[in-house]
Image: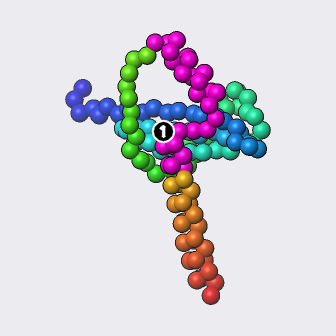
Amino acid sequence: MEGLLCTKISGKLTVYFENPFWVAVFEHIEDGMLSVSKVTLGAEPKDYEIYEFVLNRYNKLQFSSVVAAVIKEEKKNHKRVQRELRKQAKEMGIGTKSQNVLKLQQEQNKQERKIYKSSKNCREE
């Protein structure tokens, strides 16, 4: 099979409590480029609710513009992976790279709203 392109895609979902709501952060990495989407869930979600959300609403999420991401590929012992997952579950918050991408997306949305409002005001006058 000649001419096939190999694209590596990975994703990560982090659910955490940000007073007063539970928040989900979806990270999508494709060919070394990171994009992020943040969703406020409200009350503490059950596992089946998260699963249902991913199945039914993932395609409708609005992801941020992409930024370069450093991806390290290494083989790990399964026990080490479990320890790291437990450690991540204890930590509150999301990675700083993801926070920066979310902030960038928020600023872009703010600029789009300003442009929309100013063009709407011009049409009304």
Residue 27, given in percent of the width and then of the height, sits at 51, 38
Q: Which residue lies furthest to the left in this view?
A: 2
Q: Residue at x 76, y 44 (%)?
A: 20
Q: In which quarter of the image is residue 74?
A: top left
Nearest the eye: 73 or 87: 87
Q: Which residue lies furthest to the bottom in this view?
A: 125
Q: Is residue 58 above or below residue 113?
A: above
What residue is shown with label 1?
28
Q: Residue at x 73, y 29 (%)?
A: 46
Secondary structure of the residue carrying numbered label 1: strand
Disc 1 residue crowd, few under 14, some 14–19, many 20+, Cα 10 Å: some
Prevailing SS of the magenta stretch: helix
Nearest the eye: 116 or 83: 83
Q: Residue at x 67, y 41 (%)?
A: 23
39 to the left or right of 42? left
Quarter of the image where the N terminus is located: top left
Nearest the eye: 92 or 26: 92
Q: Is residue 108 above or below residue 12?
A: below
Quarter of the image where the C terminus is located: bottom right
Q: Which residue is drawn at 56% across and 77% down?
A: 119
87 to the left or right of 21? left
Residue 125 seen anywhere in this rendered image of the structure:
yes
Q: How is the image coloured?
A: rainbow
- Queried whether the magenta region covers residue 99, the answer comes back as yes
Q: Which amino acid does label 1 sit on?
A: His
Residue 63, given in percent of the width and then of the height, sits at 52, 47
Residue 68, given in percent of the width and then of the height, sits at 38, 44
Segment tinted magenta in the rendering: 77-102
Q: Quadrant of residue 47?
A: top right
- Queried whether the magenta region covers residue 119, the answer comes back as no
Residue 107, given in percent of the width and then of the height, sits at 54, 60
Residue 41 seen anywhere in this rendered image of the structure:
no
